[in-house]
Image: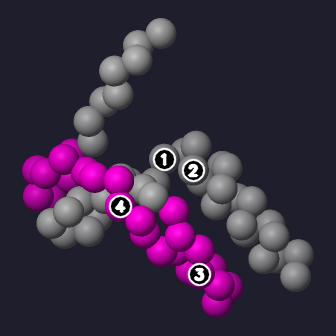
C-alpha cells in the first residue's frame, strides 16, 4: 500500500492546501471539522469519504430532530 499522501493544490491560487478547522452549516446548525483548505483564497476540498461519513451522519441527526 502506498503510504505517501498526494498533495492537494488549489487550482485558483496554485498553493498547497492545508488542514484548517472549517465550519459547515446545515438547517441552521453549525459543525466544525478540519478539511484541506487553501490558505490564500479559502477554497475547500471535501472528500467523498467525508461526505459519506461525518457529513452524512450530521445530516441524518439533524433531520431526525
Q: Is residue 9 above or below residue 13?
A: above
Residue found at x 64% / y 90%:
28
Please provide percent x and percent y for residue 47.
48, 47
* Label pair 1/2, CB-CB below 8 angstroms: yes
Cα–Cα gap, marks 2 and 4: 14 Å
SS for callout 3: strand
Q: Mark 3 or mark 1, which is nearer to you?
A: 3
Within the magenta stretch, is there residue 5? no
Is 1 displayed left or right of 31 in the figure? left
Please provide percent x and percent y for residue 60.
80, 66
Q: Is residue 54 above or below residue 28?
A: above
Residue found at x 66% / y 49%:
52
Label ID, residue 47: 1
Label ID, residue 30: 3
Instruction: Sort mark 1 into few (<14), some (14-19) or many (20+) by Cα contacts within 10 Å.
Output: few
Which residues are drawn in magenta? Answer: 9-33
Label ID, residue 20: 4
Residue found at x 53% / y 70%:
32
SS for callout 1: loop
Residue found at x 42% / y 56%:
35
Instruction: Sort mark 4 into few (<14), some (14-19) or many (20+) by Cα contacts within 10 Å.
Output: some
- Label whose residue precedes the other's in the sequence (2 or 4): 4
Q: Quadrant of residue 55?
A: bottom right
Residue that numbered label 2 is attached to: 50
Decide which of 12, 50 is in the foreground and name it: 50
Instruction: Sort mark 2 into few (<14), some (14-19) or many (20+) by Cα contacts within 10 Å.
Output: some
Cα–Cα gap, marks 3 and 1: 19 Å
SS for callout 2: helix
Amino acid at each position: 500500500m502506498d503510504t505517501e499522501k498526494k498533495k492537494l493544490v488549489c487550482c485558483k491560487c496554485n498553493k498547497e492546501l492545508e488542514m484548517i478547522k472549517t465550519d459547515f452549516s446545515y438547517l441552521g446548525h453549525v459543525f466544525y471539522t478540519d478539511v484541506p483548505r487553501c490558505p490564500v483564497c479559502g477554497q475547500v476540498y471535501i472528500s467523498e469519504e467525508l461526505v459519506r461519513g461525518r457529513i452524512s451522519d450530521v445530516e441524518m441527526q439533524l433531520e431526525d430532530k
